Amino acid sequence: MGERLVESVPNVSEGRDRAAIEAMAAALQSGPTVRLLDVQSDPDHHRTVFTLVGDPDGVADAILRLFAAALPRIDLRLHRGEHPRMGAVDVVPFVPVRGVTMADCVALARRVGREVWERFRVPVYLYEEAASRPERRDLAEIRRGEFEGFADKILREEWAPDFGERVLHPTAGATAIGAREFLIAFNVNLGTADLKVAKAIARAVRGSSGGLRYVKALGVALADRGIVQVSMNLTNYKKTPLARALDLVRSEAARHGVAVVGTEIVGLVPEEALFSAADHYLRLERFSPDQVLERRISSAPDG
Amino acid sequence: MGERLVESVPNVSEGRDRAAIEAMAAALQSGPTVRLLDVQSDPDHHRTVFTLVGDPDGVADAILRLFAAALPRIDLRLHRGEHPRMGAVDVVPFVPVRGVTMADCVALARRVGREVWERFRVPVYLYEEAASRPERRDLAEIRRGEFEGFADKILREEWAPDFGERVLHPTAGATAIGAREFLIAFNVNLGTADLKVAKAIARAVRGSSGGLRYVKALGVALADRGIVQVSMNLTNYKKTPLARALDLVRSEAARHGVAVVGTEIVGLVPEEALFSAADHYLRLERFSPDQVLERRISSAPDG
Protein backbone atom coordinates (compact mmCIF):
# COMPACT_ATOMS: atom_id res chain seq x y z
CA MET A 1 0.00 0.00 0.00
CA GLY A 2 1.06 3.58 -0.58
CA GLU A 3 2.68 5.94 1.87
CA ARG A 4 -0.47 8.07 2.41
CA LEU A 5 -3.00 6.12 4.42
CA VAL A 6 -6.42 7.04 5.78
CA GLU A 7 -8.68 4.80 7.81
CA SER A 8 -12.45 5.00 7.64
CA VAL A 9 -14.90 3.21 9.94
CA PRO A 10 -18.37 3.58 8.38
CA ASN A 11 -21.33 2.41 10.48
CA VAL A 12 -24.44 1.24 8.61
CA SER A 13 -27.91 0.47 9.99
CA GLU A 14 -28.01 -3.18 8.94
CA GLY A 15 -26.72 -5.96 11.19
CA ARG A 16 -28.89 -8.94 10.25
CA ASP A 17 -29.20 -9.49 6.49
CA ARG A 18 -25.99 -11.32 5.45
CA ALA A 19 -26.52 -10.72 1.74
CA ALA A 20 -26.94 -6.97 2.25
CA ILE A 21 -23.86 -6.81 4.49
CA GLU A 22 -21.78 -8.74 1.98
CA ALA A 23 -22.92 -6.49 -0.85
CA MET A 24 -21.82 -3.41 1.11
CA ALA A 25 -18.46 -5.05 2.01
CA ALA A 26 -17.94 -5.90 -1.67
CA ALA A 27 -18.70 -2.30 -2.67
CA LEU A 28 -16.17 -0.97 -0.14
CA GLN A 29 -13.31 -3.20 -1.24
CA SER A 30 -13.82 -3.14 -5.00
CA GLY A 31 -11.28 -0.30 -5.41
CA PRO A 32 -7.65 -1.18 -6.20
CA THR A 33 -6.09 1.01 -3.47
CA VAL A 34 -8.24 0.15 -0.44
CA ARG A 35 -8.35 -2.81 1.91
CA LEU A 36 -11.26 -3.86 4.11
CA LEU A 37 -9.63 -4.93 7.40
CA ASP A 38 -12.66 -5.81 9.47
CA VAL A 39 -16.46 -6.25 9.42
CA GLN A 40 -18.36 -6.40 12.74
CA SER A 41 -22.12 -6.98 12.61
CA ASP A 42 -24.34 -6.83 15.68
CA PRO A 43 -27.88 -8.21 15.17
CA ASP A 44 -29.17 -6.69 18.44
CA HIS A 45 -27.85 -3.27 17.50
CA HIS A 46 -28.93 -4.00 13.89
CA ARG A 47 -25.74 -2.30 12.83
CA THR A 48 -22.48 -3.17 11.01
CA VAL A 49 -19.12 -1.45 11.47
CA PHE A 50 -16.63 -1.69 8.59
CA THR A 51 -12.92 -0.85 8.95
CA LEU A 52 -11.06 0.01 5.79
CA VAL A 53 -7.77 1.70 4.93
CA GLY A 54 -6.30 3.10 1.77
CA ASP A 55 -5.07 6.24 0.10
CA PRO A 56 -7.35 9.28 0.57
CA ASP A 57 -8.89 9.21 -2.92
CA GLY A 58 -9.40 5.45 -2.78
CA VAL A 59 -11.15 5.65 0.58
CA ALA A 60 -13.36 8.55 -0.59
CA ASP A 61 -14.45 6.53 -3.64
CA ALA A 62 -15.11 3.48 -1.45
CA ILE A 63 -17.42 5.47 0.84
CA LEU A 64 -19.41 6.73 -2.16
CA ARG A 65 -19.75 3.14 -3.44
CA LEU A 66 -20.97 2.18 0.05
CA PHE A 67 -23.78 4.75 -0.17
CA ALA A 68 -24.76 3.40 -3.60
CA ALA A 69 -24.90 -0.14 -2.18
CA ALA A 70 -26.61 0.76 1.11
CA LEU A 71 -29.42 3.03 -0.06
CA PRO A 72 -31.45 0.44 -2.04
CA ARG A 73 -30.94 -2.14 0.77
CA ILE A 74 -31.76 -0.20 3.96
CA ASP A 75 -35.10 1.41 4.80
CA LEU A 76 -34.90 3.24 8.11
CA ARG A 77 -38.70 3.40 8.34
CA LEU A 78 -38.57 -0.34 9.08
CA HIS A 79 -35.37 -0.34 11.19
CA ARG A 80 -35.55 -1.29 14.88
CA GLY A 81 -32.34 -1.87 16.87
CA GLU A 82 -30.74 -1.02 20.18
CA HIS A 83 -28.14 1.39 18.80
CA PRO A 84 -29.15 5.02 18.17
CA ARG A 85 -29.09 5.93 14.46
CA MET A 86 -30.31 8.63 12.12
CA GLY A 87 -29.14 7.29 8.74
CA ALA A 88 -28.85 4.18 6.56
CA VAL A 89 -25.15 5.00 6.38
CA ASP A 90 -25.19 6.46 9.87
CA VAL A 91 -21.64 7.66 10.60
CA VAL A 92 -18.47 7.98 8.49
CA PRO A 93 -15.27 9.06 10.27
CA PHE A 94 -11.96 9.59 8.46
CA VAL A 95 -8.84 8.91 10.54
CA PRO A 96 -5.23 9.89 9.69
CA VAL A 97 -2.94 6.83 9.77
CA ARG A 98 0.25 7.64 7.88
CA GLY A 99 1.49 10.55 5.77
CA VAL A 100 -1.77 12.51 6.15
CA THR A 101 -2.76 15.23 8.61
CA MET A 102 -5.99 15.81 10.49
CA ALA A 103 -6.51 18.79 8.16
CA ASP A 104 -6.35 16.38 5.20
CA CYS A 105 -9.03 14.24 6.83
CA VAL A 106 -11.23 17.28 7.51
CA ALA A 107 -10.91 18.22 3.83
CA LEU A 108 -11.79 14.64 2.87
CA ALA A 109 -14.89 14.71 5.10
CA ARG A 110 -16.06 17.94 3.47
CA ARG A 111 -15.43 16.65 -0.06
CA VAL A 112 -17.24 13.36 0.54
CA GLY A 113 -20.03 15.13 2.43
CA ARG A 114 -20.70 17.42 -0.53
CA GLU A 115 -20.77 14.51 -2.96
CA VAL A 116 -23.07 12.44 -0.75
CA TRP A 117 -25.63 15.22 -0.91
CA GLU A 118 -25.18 15.89 -4.62
CA ARG A 119 -25.30 12.25 -5.73
CA PHE A 120 -27.64 10.67 -3.20
CA ARG A 121 -29.69 13.56 -1.78
CA VAL A 122 -28.83 12.53 1.78
CA PRO A 123 -28.26 15.61 4.00
CA VAL A 124 -24.89 15.59 5.77
CA TYR A 125 -23.70 16.86 9.16
CA LEU A 126 -19.96 17.33 9.73
CA TYR A 127 -18.77 16.23 13.19
CA GLU A 128 -15.74 16.11 15.53
CA GLU A 129 -12.66 17.69 13.92
CA ALA A 130 -14.66 18.44 10.78
CA ALA A 131 -17.52 20.15 12.68
CA SER A 132 -18.64 23.54 11.35
CA ARG A 133 -19.61 24.77 14.85
CA PRO A 134 -18.73 23.66 18.39
CA GLU A 135 -22.14 22.14 19.24
CA ARG A 136 -21.74 19.75 16.30
CA ARG A 137 -18.45 18.23 17.46
CA ASP A 138 -20.27 15.62 19.53
CA LEU A 139 -21.86 12.91 17.39
CA ALA A 140 -24.39 12.05 20.12
CA GLU A 141 -25.61 15.65 20.09
CA ILE A 142 -26.15 15.57 16.31
CA ARG A 143 -27.93 12.21 16.42
CA ARG A 144 -30.21 13.05 19.33
CA GLY A 145 -33.84 12.45 18.24
CA GLU A 146 -32.72 9.77 15.79
CA PHE A 147 -34.35 9.06 12.44
CA GLU A 148 -37.87 9.32 13.82
CA GLY A 149 -37.28 12.77 15.30
CA PHE A 150 -35.16 14.17 12.48
CA ALA A 151 -37.93 15.24 10.11
CA ASP A 152 -38.71 17.94 12.70
CA LYS A 153 -35.15 18.57 13.95
CA ILE A 154 -33.81 19.31 10.45
CA LEU A 155 -36.32 22.18 10.13
CA ARG A 156 -34.85 24.00 13.13
CA GLU A 157 -32.52 26.83 12.14
CA GLU A 158 -29.62 25.56 14.28
CA TRP A 159 -29.86 22.07 12.76
CA ALA A 160 -29.65 22.98 9.09
CA PRO A 161 -27.36 20.38 7.49
CA ASP A 162 -23.79 21.29 6.47
CA PHE A 163 -24.50 19.91 2.99
CA GLY A 164 -28.01 19.59 1.55
CA GLU A 165 -31.46 20.97 1.94
CA ARG A 166 -33.55 20.83 5.07
CA VAL A 167 -35.34 17.66 4.11
CA LEU A 168 -34.58 14.16 5.31
CA HIS A 169 -33.96 11.40 2.75
CA PRO A 170 -37.20 9.35 2.97
CA THR A 171 -35.53 5.96 3.61
CA ALA A 172 -31.87 6.82 4.32
CA GLY A 173 -32.31 9.73 6.75
CA ALA A 174 -29.21 11.86 7.31
CA THR A 175 -25.51 11.05 7.70
CA ALA A 176 -22.76 12.30 9.99
CA ILE A 177 -19.37 12.55 8.28
CA GLY A 178 -16.32 13.61 10.26
CA ALA A 179 -12.64 13.40 11.04
CA ARG A 180 -11.13 12.14 14.26
CA GLU A 181 -8.05 10.52 15.72
CA PHE A 182 -7.67 6.74 15.87
CA LEU A 183 -9.81 5.35 18.69
CA ILE A 184 -8.34 2.70 21.01
CA ALA A 185 -10.70 0.49 23.03
CA PHE A 186 -8.79 -0.25 26.25
CA ASN A 187 -10.32 -2.14 29.17
CA VAL A 188 -8.85 -2.55 32.65
CA ASN A 189 -9.99 -5.50 34.80
CA LEU A 190 -10.19 -5.08 38.56
CA GLY A 191 -9.83 -7.66 41.33
CA THR A 192 -13.29 -7.09 42.79
CA ALA A 193 -16.90 -7.98 42.03
CA ASP A 194 -18.08 -4.58 43.25
CA LEU A 195 -19.55 -2.71 40.28
CA LYS A 196 -19.72 0.49 42.33
CA VAL A 197 -15.90 0.56 42.41
CA ALA A 198 -15.65 0.26 38.62
CA LYS A 199 -18.24 3.00 38.15
CA ALA A 200 -16.47 5.30 40.62
CA ILE A 201 -13.15 4.79 38.85
CA ALA A 202 -14.75 5.34 35.43
CA ARG A 203 -16.17 8.62 36.72
CA ALA A 204 -12.74 9.64 38.02
CA VAL A 205 -10.83 8.95 34.80
CA ARG A 206 -13.23 10.07 32.07
CA GLY A 207 -12.92 13.55 30.65
CA SER A 208 -16.61 14.44 30.85
CA SER A 209 -16.60 14.27 34.66
CA GLY A 210 -13.21 15.87 35.29
CA GLY A 211 -10.76 13.12 34.40
CA LEU A 212 -8.48 12.75 31.39
CA ARG A 213 -9.49 14.90 28.44
CA TYR A 214 -9.54 12.13 25.78
CA VAL A 215 -10.92 9.25 27.82
CA LYS A 216 -14.49 7.96 27.74
CA ALA A 217 -15.11 5.35 30.43
CA LEU A 218 -17.84 3.09 31.81
CA GLY A 219 -17.85 0.66 34.73
CA VAL A 220 -19.16 -2.76 33.66
CA ALA A 221 -19.46 -6.20 35.27
CA LEU A 222 -17.77 -9.27 33.75
CA ALA A 223 -20.31 -11.69 35.19
CA ASP A 224 -18.63 -14.89 33.95
CA ARG A 225 -15.34 -13.97 35.65
CA GLY A 226 -16.90 -12.49 38.79
CA ILE A 227 -14.95 -9.25 38.38
CA VAL A 228 -15.60 -5.73 37.12
CA GLN A 229 -13.98 -3.67 34.40
CA VAL A 230 -13.33 -0.05 33.55
CA SER A 231 -14.12 -0.04 29.82
CA MET A 232 -12.44 2.93 28.09
CA ASN A 233 -12.26 4.55 24.70
CA LEU A 234 -9.12 6.61 24.19
CA THR A 235 -10.17 9.17 21.60
CA ASN A 236 -6.72 10.71 21.17
CA TYR A 237 -3.94 8.31 22.14
CA LYS A 238 -1.29 10.88 21.26
CA LYS A 239 -2.50 13.32 23.91
CA THR A 240 -3.87 10.82 26.44
CA PRO A 241 -1.65 7.75 26.03
CA LEU A 242 -2.41 4.19 27.16
CA ALA A 243 0.12 4.37 30.00
CA ARG A 244 -1.43 7.49 31.53
CA ALA A 245 -4.94 6.03 31.39
CA LEU A 246 -3.77 2.79 33.01
CA ASP A 247 -1.72 4.54 35.68
CA LEU A 248 -4.67 6.73 36.67
CA VAL A 249 -7.04 3.75 36.85
CA ARG A 250 -4.42 1.93 38.95
CA SER A 251 -4.04 4.74 41.45
CA GLU A 252 -7.82 5.28 41.72
CA ALA A 253 -8.24 1.52 42.23
CA ALA A 254 -5.61 1.54 44.99
CA ARG A 255 -7.65 4.19 46.78
CA HIS A 256 -10.44 1.56 46.94
CA GLY A 257 -7.98 -1.16 47.99
CA VAL A 258 -8.47 -2.91 44.65
CA ALA A 259 -5.78 -4.26 42.29
CA VAL A 260 -5.58 -4.17 38.49
CA VAL A 261 -5.64 -7.85 37.47
CA GLY A 262 -5.22 -7.38 33.73
CA THR A 263 -6.11 -5.27 30.70
CA GLU A 264 -7.12 -5.73 27.09
CA ILE A 265 -6.98 -3.80 23.85
CA VAL A 266 -10.07 -4.60 21.80
CA GLY A 267 -9.49 -4.54 18.06
CA LEU A 268 -6.71 -2.62 16.37
CA VAL A 269 -4.04 -0.36 17.85
CA PRO A 270 -1.50 1.83 16.00
CA GLU A 271 2.10 0.70 16.53
CA GLU A 272 2.97 4.20 17.73
CA ALA A 273 0.65 3.76 20.75
CA LEU A 274 2.56 0.62 21.78
CA PHE A 275 5.97 2.20 21.11
CA SER A 276 4.87 5.08 23.33
CA ALA A 277 3.87 2.71 26.17
CA ALA A 278 7.22 0.89 25.90
CA ASP A 279 9.04 4.25 25.85
CA HIS A 280 7.15 5.41 28.96
CA TYR A 281 7.60 2.33 31.11
CA LEU A 282 11.15 1.56 29.97
CA ARG A 283 11.96 5.20 30.86
CA LEU A 284 13.84 5.76 27.60
CA GLU A 285 15.59 9.13 27.48
CA ARG A 286 15.52 9.69 23.73
CA PHE A 287 13.73 7.08 21.76
CA SER A 288 12.83 7.59 18.11
CA PRO A 289 10.54 5.31 16.07
CA ASP A 290 13.32 5.45 13.47
CA GLN A 291 15.19 3.04 15.73
CA VAL A 292 12.63 0.35 15.00
CA LEU A 293 14.23 -2.17 12.68
CA GLU A 294 11.07 -2.82 10.66
CA ARG A 295 10.59 0.90 9.98
CA ARG A 296 14.15 1.22 8.71
CA ILE A 297 13.60 -1.70 6.39
CA SER A 298 10.43 -0.29 4.88
CA SER A 299 11.64 3.31 4.63
CA ALA A 300 15.21 2.81 3.38
CA PRO A 301 15.72 3.88 -0.23
CA ASP A 302 16.07 1.15 -2.84
CA GLY A 303 19.57 0.10 -3.72
CA MET B 1 11.40 -5.81 0.43
CA GLY B 2 10.39 -9.46 0.43
CA GLU B 3 8.81 -11.40 3.22
CA ARG B 4 11.99 -13.38 4.08
CA LEU B 5 14.49 -11.10 5.77
CA VAL B 6 17.91 -11.75 7.27
CA GLU B 7 20.12 -9.17 8.93
CA SER B 8 23.90 -9.34 8.79
CA VAL B 9 26.31 -7.17 10.80
CA PRO B 10 29.78 -7.72 9.32
CA ASN B 11 32.73 -6.19 11.23
CA VAL B 12 35.82 -5.27 9.21
CA SER B 13 39.27 -4.23 10.46
CA GLU B 14 39.32 -0.79 8.87
CA GLY B 15 37.99 2.28 10.65
CA ARG B 16 40.11 5.12 9.27
CA ASP B 17 40.41 5.08 5.46
CA ARG B 18 37.18 6.68 4.15
CA ALA B 19 37.75 5.50 0.58
CA ALA B 20 38.22 1.89 1.67
CA ILE B 21 35.14 2.03 3.90
CA GLU B 22 33.04 3.50 1.11
CA ALA B 23 34.24 0.86 -1.34
CA MET B 24 33.16 -1.87 1.08
CA ALA B 25 29.80 -0.18 1.70
CA ALA B 26 29.27 0.08 -2.06
CA ALA B 27 30.09 -3.62 -2.48
CA LEU B 28 27.57 -4.58 0.20
CA GLN B 29 24.69 -2.59 -1.23
CA SER B 30 25.19 -3.24 -4.93
CA GLY B 31 22.71 -6.16 -4.92
CA PRO B 32 19.08 -5.46 -5.85
CA THR B 33 17.53 -7.24 -2.82
CA VAL B 34 19.64 -5.89 0.05
CA ARG B 35 19.69 -2.59 1.93
CA LEU B 36 22.57 -1.16 3.91
CA LEU B 37 20.93 0.39 7.01
CA ASP B 38 23.92 1.63 8.93
CA VAL B 39 27.71 2.12 8.82
CA GLN B 40 29.59 2.82 12.07
CA SER B 41 33.33 3.43 11.87
CA ASP B 42 35.55 3.81 14.94
CA PRO B 43 39.08 5.13 14.25
CA ASP B 44 40.37 4.16 17.72
CA HIS B 45 39.09 0.62 17.30
CA HIS B 46 40.19 0.80 13.64
CA ARG B 47 37.02 -1.08 12.84
CA THR B 48 33.77 -0.58 10.90
CA VAL B 49 30.44 -2.25 11.59
CA PHE B 50 27.96 -2.50 8.71
CA THR B 51 24.27 -3.34 9.20
CA LEU B 52 22.43 -4.73 6.19
CA VAL B 53 19.17 -6.58 5.60
CA GLY B 54 17.75 -8.48 2.69
CA ASP B 55 16.57 -11.86 1.51
CA PRO B 56 18.90 -14.74 2.47
CA ASP B 57 20.46 -15.20 -0.98
CA GLY B 58 20.92 -11.46 -1.44
CA VAL B 59 22.65 -11.10 1.93
CA ALA B 60 24.90 -14.11 1.22
CA ASP B 61 25.98 -12.56 -2.10
CA ALA B 62 26.58 -9.20 -0.41
CA ILE B 63 28.90 -10.77 2.16
CA LEU B 64 30.94 -12.45 -0.59
CA ARG B 65 31.20 -9.11 -2.41
CA LEU B 66 32.39 -7.58 0.89
CA PHE B 67 35.26 -10.09 1.08
CA ALA B 68 36.23 -9.29 -2.51
CA ALA B 69 36.31 -5.56 -1.65
CA ALA B 70 38.03 -5.92 1.73
CA LEU B 71 40.88 -8.28 0.94
CA PRO B 72 42.87 -5.99 -1.40
CA ARG B 73 42.30 -3.03 0.97
CA ILE B 74 43.14 -4.43 4.40
CA ASP B 75 46.50 -5.83 5.52
CA LEU B 76 46.30 -7.15 9.07
CA ARG B 77 50.11 -7.20 9.34
CA LEU B 78 49.91 -3.40 9.50
CA HIS B 79 46.70 -3.12 11.56
CA ARG B 80 46.84 -1.61 15.07
CA GLY B 81 43.62 -0.77 16.92
CA GLU B 82 41.99 -1.14 20.31
CA HIS B 83 39.45 -3.75 19.32
CA PRO B 84 40.51 -7.43 19.26
CA ARG B 85 40.51 -8.92 15.74
CA MET B 86 41.80 -11.92 13.84
CA GLY B 87 40.63 -11.13 10.28
CA ALA B 88 40.27 -8.40 7.66
CA VAL B 89 36.60 -9.31 7.60
CA ASP B 90 36.63 -10.20 11.26
CA VAL B 91 33.11 -11.36 12.16
CA VAL B 92 29.95 -12.03 10.13
CA PRO B 93 26.75 -12.88 12.03
CA PHE B 94 23.46 -13.75 10.33
CA VAL B 95 20.33 -12.82 12.26
CA PRO B 96 16.76 -13.97 11.56
CA VAL B 97 14.41 -10.97 11.17
CA ARG B 98 11.23 -12.12 9.42
CA GLY B 99 10.07 -15.34 7.78
CA VAL B 100 13.35 -17.16 8.46
CA THR B 101 14.37 -19.46 11.33
CA MET B 102 17.59 -19.68 13.28
CA ALA B 103 18.19 -22.99 11.44
CA ASP B 104 18.00 -21.06 8.15
CA CYS B 105 20.64 -18.63 9.43
CA VAL B 106 22.87 -21.50 10.58
CA ALA B 107 22.60 -23.02 7.09
CA LEU B 108 23.42 -19.62 5.59
CA ALA B 109 26.51 -19.27 7.81
CA ARG B 110 27.74 -22.71 6.70
CA ARG B 111 27.11 -21.99 3.01
CA VAL B 112 28.84 -18.60 3.10
CA GLY B 113 31.68 -20.02 5.25
CA ARG B 114 32.40 -22.72 2.68
CA GLU B 115 32.42 -20.21 -0.17
CA VAL B 116 34.69 -17.79 1.70
CA TRP B 117 37.29 -20.53 1.97
CA GLU B 118 36.86 -21.76 -1.59
CA ARG B 119 36.94 -18.34 -3.26
CA PHE B 120 39.23 -16.35 -0.99
CA ARG B 121 41.33 -18.94 0.88
CA VAL B 122 40.43 -17.39 4.22
CA PRO B 123 39.91 -20.10 6.89
CA VAL B 124 36.52 -19.86 8.63
CA TYR B 125 35.32 -20.62 12.18
CA LEU B 126 31.60 -21.07 12.80
CA TYR B 127 30.35 -19.46 16.03
CA GLU B 128 27.32 -19.04 18.31
CA GLU B 129 24.26 -20.89 16.97
CA ALA B 130 26.31 -22.10 13.98
CA ALA B 131 29.20 -23.43 16.13
CA SER B 132 30.38 -26.97 15.35
CA ARG B 133 31.31 -27.63 18.99
CA PRO B 134 30.40 -26.00 22.33
CA GLU B 135 33.78 -24.31 22.93
CA ARG B 136 33.36 -22.40 19.65
CA ARG B 137 30.05 -20.78 20.57
CA ASP B 138 31.82 -17.86 22.21
CA LEU B 139 33.37 -15.47 19.70
CA ALA B 140 35.89 -14.16 22.25
CA GLU B 141 37.16 -17.71 22.76
CA ILE B 142 37.72 -18.21 19.04
CA ARG B 143 39.43 -14.84 18.63
CA ARG B 144 41.72 -15.17 21.65
CA GLY B 145 45.36 -14.71 20.49
CA GLU B 146 44.19 -12.43 17.67
CA PHE B 147 45.82 -12.23 14.25
CA GLU B 148 49.35 -12.20 15.67
CA GLY B 149 48.80 -15.41 17.65
CA PHE B 150 46.72 -17.25 15.08
CA ALA B 151 49.52 -18.63 12.93
CA ASP B 152 50.33 -20.89 15.89
CA LYS B 153 46.76 -21.36 17.21
CA ILE B 154 45.48 -22.69 13.88
CA LEU B 155 48.04 -25.51 14.01
CA ARG B 156 46.59 -26.89 17.26
CA GLU B 157 44.29 -29.86 16.69
CA GLU B 158 41.37 -28.33 18.60
CA TRP B 159 41.56 -25.11 16.56
CA ALA B 160 41.38 -26.58 13.07
CA PRO B 161 39.06 -24.29 11.09
CA ASP B 162 35.52 -25.40 10.19
CA PHE B 163 36.22 -24.57 6.55
CA GLY B 164 39.72 -24.41 5.08
CA GLU B 165 43.20 -25.66 5.70
CA ARG B 166 45.27 -25.00 8.80
CA VAL B 167 47.03 -22.00 7.38
CA LEU B 168 46.19 -18.36 8.01
CA HIS B 169 45.54 -16.04 5.04
CA PRO B 170 48.75 -13.93 4.95
CA THR B 171 47.00 -10.51 5.05
CA ALA B 172 43.35 -11.32 5.86
CA GLY B 173 43.83 -13.78 8.73
CA ALA B 174 40.76 -15.85 9.59
CA THR B 175 37.05 -15.07 9.84
CA ALA B 176 34.31 -16.01 12.28
CA ILE B 177 30.92 -16.56 10.64
CA GLY B 178 27.90 -17.37 12.73
CA ALA B 179 24.21 -17.11 13.46
CA ARG B 180 22.65 -15.38 16.44
CA GLU B 181 19.54 -13.61 17.63
CA PHE B 182 19.12 -9.86 17.19
CA LEU B 183 21.23 -8.02 19.76
CA ILE B 184 19.74 -5.05 21.62
CA ALA B 185 22.10 -2.54 23.25
CA PHE B 186 20.19 -1.30 26.31
CA ASN B 187 21.72 1.05 28.88
CA VAL B 188 20.26 2.00 32.26
CA ASN B 189 21.38 5.26 33.90
CA LEU B 190 21.59 5.46 37.70
CA GLY B 191 21.23 8.44 40.00
CA THR B 192 24.69 8.13 41.53
CA ALA B 193 28.30 8.90 40.62
CA ASP B 194 29.52 5.74 42.38
CA LEU B 195 30.98 3.43 39.74
CA LYS B 196 31.14 0.60 42.28
CA VAL B 197 27.35 0.53 42.38
CA ALA B 198 27.08 0.20 38.58
CA LYS B 199 29.69 -2.55 38.56
CA ALA B 200 27.92 -4.44 41.37
CA ILE B 201 24.59 -4.24 39.55
CA ALA B 202 26.18 -5.32 36.27
CA ARG B 203 27.62 -8.35 38.05
CA ALA B 204 24.21 -9.15 39.53
CA VAL B 205 22.28 -9.00 36.24
CA ARG B 206 24.67 -10.54 33.71
CA GLY B 207 24.38 -14.21 32.84
CA SER B 208 28.07 -15.04 33.20
CA SER B 209 28.07 -14.26 36.93
CA GLY B 210 24.69 -15.75 37.82
CA GLY B 211 22.21 -13.17 36.51
CA LEU B 212 19.93 -13.30 33.48
CA ARG B 213 20.95 -15.90 30.91
CA TYR B 214 20.98 -13.60 27.84
CA VAL B 215 22.36 -10.42 29.38
CA LYS B 216 25.92 -9.14 29.07
CA ALA B 217 26.55 -6.13 31.32
CA LEU B 218 29.26 -3.66 32.32
CA GLY B 219 29.29 -0.80 34.79
CA VAL B 220 30.57 2.42 33.18
CA ALA B 221 30.88 6.07 34.23
CA LEU B 222 29.16 8.84 32.24
CA ALA B 223 31.68 11.47 33.27
CA ASP B 224 29.99 14.42 31.55
CA ARG B 225 26.70 13.77 33.38
CA GLY B 226 28.28 12.84 36.71
CA ILE B 227 26.35 9.56 36.84
CA VAL B 228 27.01 5.89 36.15
CA GLN B 229 25.40 3.42 33.79
CA VAL B 230 24.74 -0.30 33.53
CA SER B 231 25.53 -0.92 29.87
CA MET B 232 23.88 -4.12 28.63
CA ASN B 233 23.69 -6.27 25.54
CA LEU B 234 20.56 -8.40 25.38
CA THR B 235 21.61 -11.35 23.24
CA ASN B 236 18.15 -12.95 23.06
CA TYR B 237 15.37 -10.44 23.66
CA LYS B 238 12.73 -13.13 23.20
CA LYS B 239 13.95 -15.10 26.21
CA THR B 240 15.32 -12.22 28.30
CA PRO B 241 13.08 -9.27 27.40
CA LEU B 242 13.83 -5.57 27.94
CA ALA B 243 11.29 -5.30 30.78
CA ARG B 244 12.87 -8.11 32.79
CA ALA B 245 16.37 -6.69 32.40
CA LEU B 246 15.18 -3.23 33.49
CA ASP B 247 13.14 -4.55 36.41
CA LEU B 248 16.10 -6.52 37.74
CA VAL B 249 18.45 -3.54 37.43
CA ARG B 250 15.85 -1.42 39.20
CA SER B 251 15.47 -3.80 42.14
CA GLU B 252 19.25 -4.26 42.47
CA ALA B 253 19.69 -0.48 42.39
CA ALA B 254 17.04 -0.07 45.11
CA ARG B 255 19.11 -2.40 47.30
CA HIS B 256 21.89 0.26 47.02
CA GLY B 257 19.42 3.09 47.64
CA VAL B 258 19.89 4.29 44.06
CA ALA B 259 17.18 5.23 41.50
CA VAL B 260 16.99 4.54 37.79
CA VAL B 261 17.04 7.99 36.17
CA GLY B 262 16.63 6.93 32.55
CA THR B 263 17.50 4.37 29.90
CA GLU B 264 18.50 4.24 26.26
CA ILE B 265 18.36 1.81 23.39
CA VAL B 266 21.44 2.29 21.22
CA GLY B 267 20.84 1.61 17.55
CA LEU B 268 18.07 -0.55 16.20
CA VAL B 269 15.42 -2.57 18.02
CA PRO B 270 12.88 -5.03 16.56
CA GLU B 271 9.28 -3.85 16.91
CA GLU B 272 8.43 -7.11 18.66
CA ALA B 273 10.74 -6.19 21.56
CA LEU B 274 8.82 -2.92 22.07
CA PHE B 275 5.41 -4.59 21.67
CA SER B 276 6.53 -7.07 24.32
CA ALA B 277 7.53 -4.28 26.74
CA ALA B 278 4.18 -2.53 26.18
CA ASP B 279 2.36 -5.84 26.69
CA HIS B 280 4.26 -6.49 29.94
CA TYR B 281 3.81 -3.10 31.56
CA LEU B 282 0.26 -2.52 30.31
CA ARG B 283 -0.56 -5.97 31.77
CA LEU B 284 -2.45 -7.02 28.66
CA GLU B 285 -4.21 -10.37 29.08
CA ARG B 286 -4.15 -11.53 25.47
CA PHE B 287 -2.35 -9.28 23.09
CA SER B 288 -1.46 -10.37 19.57
CA PRO B 289 0.82 -8.45 17.20
CA ASP B 290 -1.97 -9.02 14.65
CA GLN B 291 -3.83 -6.25 16.49
CA VAL B 292 -1.25 -3.73 15.34
CA LEU B 293 -2.85 -1.62 12.63
CA GLU B 294 0.31 -1.32 10.54
CA ARG B 295 0.76 -5.10 10.46
CA ARG B 296 -2.79 -5.60 9.27
CA ILE B 297 -2.24 -3.10 6.50
CA SER B 298 0.92 -4.75 5.24
CA SER B 299 -0.32 -8.33 5.56
CA ALA B 300 -3.88 -7.98 4.24
CA PRO B 301 -4.44 -9.61 0.85
CA ASP B 302 -4.76 -7.37 -2.18
CA GLY B 303 -8.27 -6.43 -3.21
Image: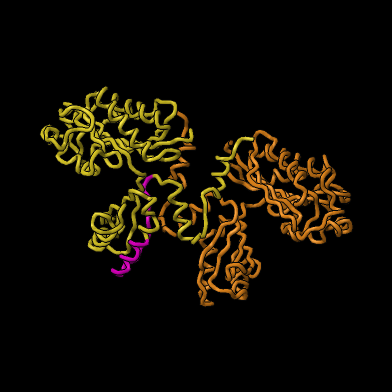
Chain colours: A orange, B yellow
Residue B229 can be seen in this image: no
- Percent across and percent down for residue A111 are 74, 42
Residue A129 can be seen in this image: yes
Q: Residue at x 56, y 57 (%)?
A: A265
Q: Residue B249 in magenta?
A: yes
- Percent across and percent down for residue A276 are 49, 54
- Percent across and percent down for residue B265 are 38, 50
Measured along the vertical axis of the image, is residue A112 above or below residue B70? below
Which is more toward the observer, A250 or A180? A250
- Percent across and percent down for residue B207 are 27, 55
Q: How many marks?
A: 0
Give left or right: position of B112 versus A90: left
Give left or right: position of B26 versus A209: left
Q: Residue at x 43, y 32 (%)?
A: B55
Which is more toward the observer, A296 or A31? A31
**Quarter where residue A214 is shown:** bottom right
Measured along the vertical axis of the image, is residue B174 above or below residue B191? above
Q: Residue A278 in magenta?
A: no
Name the residue at the left extreme. Answer: B152
Q: Residue at x 67, y 47 (%)?
A: A39
Q: Residue at x 70, y 50 (%)?
A: A49
Q: Quadrant of the C terminus of chain B?
A: top right
Report the span colored magenta: B247-267
Measured along the vertical axis of the image, is residue A94 above or below residue A227? above
